[in-house]
Image (cartoon, helix red, strand yellow):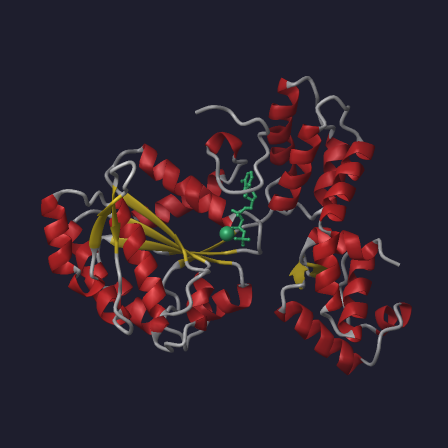
């Protein structure tokens, strides 16, 4: 594969070479799947869940054991029919379905999905599409699981942004999925999601269908020394290096959150003729923050006065252990405790604030920087 101009990837997954660490996590996930256990992967946004799934699947595919890996991101689906359609499309699209015989089998098994084979007018490449009659999602889901079962192949299916299913109008989606997943012997799942309270509730509440049905894996920030060595591997190739103390500064500024670290490294790499020191790092961070200032301005404008005051106070402190403490309220001229509590709940619910190492922080680390710098 042609190497990238900039090795610090900030969108998507570009291969193991550009992927830092996660060796233990990859091993745990593969071990679980190979031992008939489903996986639930819960972590904050932008820490690397999606990347990790792709890394795991790449590893499994490289072993050529015949195991099929399917990835679906259900964030854009709004109901069960759309979920099933996406699932069918991902699975059928990949299982190599262009032969007449395979097509006949699919048509028989998946009648409810109304599969059609179309040929790209220019390339002549066949593509399979499905069309679910409205309200047929449940029947089609049963058909897909039957199809997977009959395929006889071992299949791993990753469902990313899994918490989305709780927003479908069909209340029983969780129970329905669970009932199929439980009884299919050759298919295992990775459920991934970032809305931590929703995901935890789904998998750890005794009232819910998915209770204790899978092994939980959480993702912490990548170890700082491992990360620095990874970064220096690329910097050294062009005669540069980032010192341990400068890397600590970079890493701590964004609490080691993967996407932010990557974004800063990507920018540092771009300034290829400059020596990497604290000043250059600060310049890169400032640039990244400023580029998003319009977006931050819009977020900020949507907040009530209390929410805005609280968010800004948290940003100024960097991390706040007890936002309900009198000293914190007094220092930042915050309103009554009951109002702070309400504002805090809202900020958490809207994912503007989250907990990190037992303290409250502004979820988007660049937004936090922007707020802290505002007068
Ligand atoms: N281990 C890693 N090494 C290098 N870069 C990584 C790593 N993990 C993630 N990234 C980078 O960070 C970006 C964000 O990661 P990813 O999309 O996997 O996070 P996520 O947890 O799925 O986020 P979201 O919750 O927003 O979907 C990726 O595009 C990738 O460039
Ligand atoms: Mg993701």
* Residue located at (72% from left, 28% from top): 271
The outermost residue toward the front is: 121
Up/down of 126 relative to 173, above or below: above
- Horizontal arrangement in the rendering, residue 301 relative to residue 18 (left or right): right
Front-most of 169 and 64?
169
* Residue located at (85% from left, 74% from top): 334
Percent position (x, y) of residue 22?
51, 40
Count up the numbered dots: 0
* Residue located at (79% from left, 80% from top): 337
Front-most of 130 and 72?
130
Instruction: Inspect this view and state whether residue 49 appears.
Output: yes
Q: Which quadrant does the N terminus fall into?
A: top left
Quarter of the view holding residue 211 = bottom left
Percent position (x, y) of residue 89?
30, 54
Front-most of 79 and 100?
100
Q: Which quadrant does the C terminus fall into?
A: bottom right
Percent position (x, y) of residue 57?
37, 42
């Amino acid at each position: 594969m042609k190497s990238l101009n900039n090795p610090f990837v900030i969108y998507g997954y570009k291969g193991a070479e550009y992927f830092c660490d996660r060796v233990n996590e990859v091993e745990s996930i593969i071990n679980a799947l190979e031992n008939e256990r489903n996986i639930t992967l819960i972590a904050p946004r932008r820490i690397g869940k999606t990347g990790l799934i792709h890394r795991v699947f790449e590893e499994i595919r490289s072993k050529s054991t015949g195991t099929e890996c399917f990835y679906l991101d259900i964030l854009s689906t709004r109901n069960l029919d759309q979920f099933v359609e996406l699932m069918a499309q991902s699975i059928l699209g990949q299982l190599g379905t262009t032969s007449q015989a395979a097509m006949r089998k699919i048509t028989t098994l998946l009648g409810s999905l109304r599969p059609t084979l179309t040929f790209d007018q220019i390339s002549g490449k066949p593509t399979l599409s499905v069309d679910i009659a409205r309200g047929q999602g449940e029947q089609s889901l049963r058909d897909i699981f039957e199809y997977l079962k009959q395929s006889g192949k071992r299949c791993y299916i990753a469902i990313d942004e899994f918490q989305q299913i709780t927003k479908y109008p069909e209340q029983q989606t969780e129970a329905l999925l669970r009932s199929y997943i439980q009884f299919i012997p050759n298919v295992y799942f990775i459920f991934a999601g970032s809305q931590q309270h929703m995901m935890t509730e789904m998998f750890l509440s005794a009232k819910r269908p998915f209770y204790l049905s899978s092994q939980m894996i959480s993702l912490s920030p990548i170890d700082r020394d491992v990360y620095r060595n990874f970064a220096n591997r690329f910097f050294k190739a062009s005669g540069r290096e980032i010192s341990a103390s400068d890397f600590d500064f970079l890493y701590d500024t964004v609490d080691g959150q993967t996407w932010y670290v990557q974004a800063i490294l990507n920018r540092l790499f771009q300034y290829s003729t400059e020596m990497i020191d604290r000043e250059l790092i600060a310049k890169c961070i400032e640039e990244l923050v400023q580029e998003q200032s319009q977006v931050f301005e819009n977020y900020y404008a949507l907040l009530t006065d209390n929410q805005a005051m609280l968010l800004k106070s948290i940003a100024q402190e960097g991390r706040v252990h007890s936002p309900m403490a009198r000293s914190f309220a007094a220092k930042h001229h915050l309103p009554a405790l009951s109002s702070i509590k309400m504002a805090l709940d809202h900020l958490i619910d809207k994912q503007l604030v989250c907990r990190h190492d037992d303290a409250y922080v502004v979820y988007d680390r660049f937004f936090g920087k922007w707020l802290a710098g505002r007068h």
